[in-house]
Image (spheres, grey):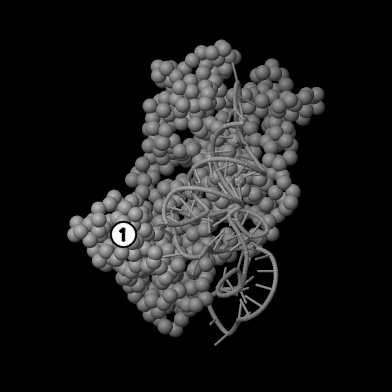
Amino acid sequence: MELITLKKELTKCLQQAVLEAQQQGALPSAALPELPIEHPQNPEHGDFASGLPLKLARAMRMSPMAIAEKICEHIVLPPEIDKVWIAAPGFINFSLRKDWLSTQVESVLAAGESYGDIDLGKGKRVQLEFVSVNPTGPLHVGHGRGAVLGSTLANVLTASGYAVEKEYYINDMGNQIDNFGRSLYARYQQCLDKEAAMPSDGYLGNYTIDLAKEIMQEQGDRFLLLPESEATSQLAEIGVAKMLQRIKQDLELLNVDFDNWFSERSLYQGGQYDKAMELLQSGGYIAKKENATWFESSSLGEDKDNVLVRSDGSPTYFASDIAYHYNKFVERRFDWVIDIWGADHQGHVPRMKAVLKALGYDPERLKVIICQLVTLRRGEEIVKVSKRSGDIITLKEVIDEVGSDACRFFFLSRSADGQMDFDLELAKKQSADNPVYYVQYAHARIASILRLAAQRVGDYSQGDVSLLTTEPELTLIRQVILLPEIIERVAATLEPHHLPYYAQDLATVFHSFYKQCRVVSKDEALTKTRLKLVKATQIALAKVLSLMGMAAPEKM
RNA sequence: GCCCCUGUAGCUCAGAGGAUAGAGCACUGGCCUCCGGAGCCAGGUGCAAGGGUUCGAAUCCCUUCAGGGGCACCA
C-alpha cells in the first residue's frame, strides 16, 4: 500500500472507530464531519494527525481529549501503523512502522518512471486550452507564464490518469487580422520605398518591419500590383503563418507543445458557428436589437446581454468562442474543459459559463483558470509590455537570458492568481545560485554516485532495505513517498506551484542525508542498501522535474 | 460607480480552519583525510488595518485602506 492510500485508509479507520464507539454507547451520536488526515509539520506529532475530536466536541458535549481517548480505544489500526496516541488539545496522532517505511523504497524502484502516477482521472477526457495568443505578434513573458502553467498541468493531469489533449486556439480572423494585414501592407510598401502610413491602430512593433522585409525578399514586389484589399488579406495570411511558426518555435524553446492547433476560421467553414447559433436561437436566447444580434445572457443571471453579430454582419469574438465551446462539448464530447486565460479576459468567464447553461451543459464542466499578469522589470525599471508599442521584451529574449529551466521554475513558483514580478536582473544575478540548480544538482549528484557505484559495486539489487533505520534515511524516505500526494493535490486544485516547492524540499532532505550518510563505503551490505534509497530519490526527483518540464541532468 | 485577483520576513514567494507561520535570495559566522562545496550546519525579523464566525483564523464573512485587472457592435 502506498502512503496516499494508507492516508485514506486511516480516515476510514477513524470513522469506523467513532461508529463503533457510538454503537457501544461510549460516544453520543453525532454527524461525522469531513476531516482529512494531515501530515503534521512537527515530527513529534507523528506521520499523520487528525483533529476529529476537536470537531466532534460541541455536538457530543464532551471534551475533545475524552473523545480522542474513546476513539483510540475503539480504533482498529492498519498493520502499517506503529503507534497511535492523543495530544492536547484533542489530536490523534499516528506514526508509521519504520520497517514499512523502508519497504517503500522497493516500491518506488519497482514503479520506476511511473512512480507518482495515480488513478484520479479514471481516463476522463480533458481538454486543456492555453496560450492561444493572437498570431499578430511575438509572445511576451505573460504568455510564457500561461504556457508553462498549461503544459505543467497537462503533465500532471496525464500522470493523474486523465486523457489530456492540449490545444492552441488560433484567432485567425476578425478585426485584429485585418489590422495586422494593413500594418504589414504599410511596412511592405515602406520597404519598397513607397510612402505609406501605418494604420492609426496598427501593430507598430519592429517585428512587422522584419516580417515585411522577409516577405519582400521571398516574393518580391508582386503585392504592389494587387488591389489594396487583396494585398492586405494575402499579406495577413502569410504574416499569420509566419507568426505562428515563430510562436511555435518560441514555445518549443520553453518545452511547450500542443496536440492540436485549432483555427477559429474553421468554425465558420465547418458549420459549428451555424449550429451553435441555431441551438441558442431555439433555446430563446437570441434577440435582435439595433440591427445587431444579441445573446440574452441577462436571462441567465448575467449583468448584461452581449453582442454576437455586429450591425455590419460580422460575428464577434464571443460568437466564435461560443462555436468553439460548442465544438469542444457537443462535437468532441470532452468530459472536462480547462481554459487558461489572461487576467484581461476575466470578464469573459461568466459569459462563457452562461453559454454552457444555455447549451444545456453543467457550467462546472468548464474550468477557467485566470492567469494574472506579469510585470517585467530590469532592476528598478519597469518594462512596459505592450503589443502595440515598438519596445517589447519578447519571451524568446527572456528565455535566451535566463534559460528555459530557470524560466519554467520561476513561472511555476508563483500561484496563478497573483500577479508576479519578473526581474530580469535578479534572474540573471541569481542564476548561479538559483533554486533550479539546487534541485538539478541533487539529481546530478545522485547520478554521479551511481556512476561511481557502477564501477565499485556493480549490481546492488540485493541491497536489504530493512537496514535503513537511521533518522536521515527515514526522513528521506518520508519525503520521497510524498510525491503521489503532491501530484494528487496539483491535479485536484490545478495549482502546479506546489511542484517546485516539493522539489526543493526533496533536494534539501537529500543533500542533508548525503552529508550525514556515506553511500559508497567499505560496508558492502549498507552500500547496496543506500544505493537503493539514492536511486529511489533520483526517481522521485526526475519525476517532479519532468512534470515541471525541466531537464534532469546527469552532469552539470 | 460595479465586478474579479492580490496584500505574509529587507526582497521574491509558500502556507489543505489546527499544535511553535515556512522556503529561496540577501546579510553574518562555522564545516572539505572521504561518494560532486552548485553542498551542509547555525544566526531573526513578519500575517495591511478594524470588526465578526469558531474550541481554534494568515486561511471563512463584513468594512476600510493599498496595488493590479476588467466593465465595447475590441480580443
Q: Which residue is drawn at 49% across and 59% down?
A: A502
Q: Position of residue A246 (x, y in %)?
A: 62, 39
Q: Position of residue A144 (x, y in %)?
A: 59, 45
Tell which of B29 and A186 is nearer to you. Answer: B29
Q: Quadrant of residue A357?
A: top left
Image check: B63 left or right of A322? right
Q: Residue at x 74, y 29 (%)?
A: A187
Tell which of A475 and B39 is nearer to you. Answer: A475
Q: Can residue A213 be seen in this view?
A: no
Q: Is mark 1 on a helix, strand or loop?
A: loop
In this rendering, the answer to whether A342 lies above or below A436 is: above
In this rendering, the answer to whether A348 lies above or below A426 is: above
In this rendering, the answer to whether A195 lies above or below A16 is: above
Tell which of B47 and A316 is nearer to you. Answer: B47
Image check: A524 left or right of A231? left
* Subunit under mark 1: A
Image check: A120 left or right of A134? left
Q: Quadrant of residue A480?
A: bottom left
In this rendering, the answer to whether B31 lies above or below A551 is: below
- Residue flagged by tag 1: what amino acid is it? Met
Quarter of the image with the N terminus of chain A in it: bottom left
Residue marked by disc 1: A62
Q: Position of residue A166 (x, y in %)?
A: 47, 40
Q: Residue at x 59, y 14 (%)?
A: A312
Q: Is residue A450 visible?
A: yes
Q: Position of residue A200 (x, y in %)?
A: 74, 25
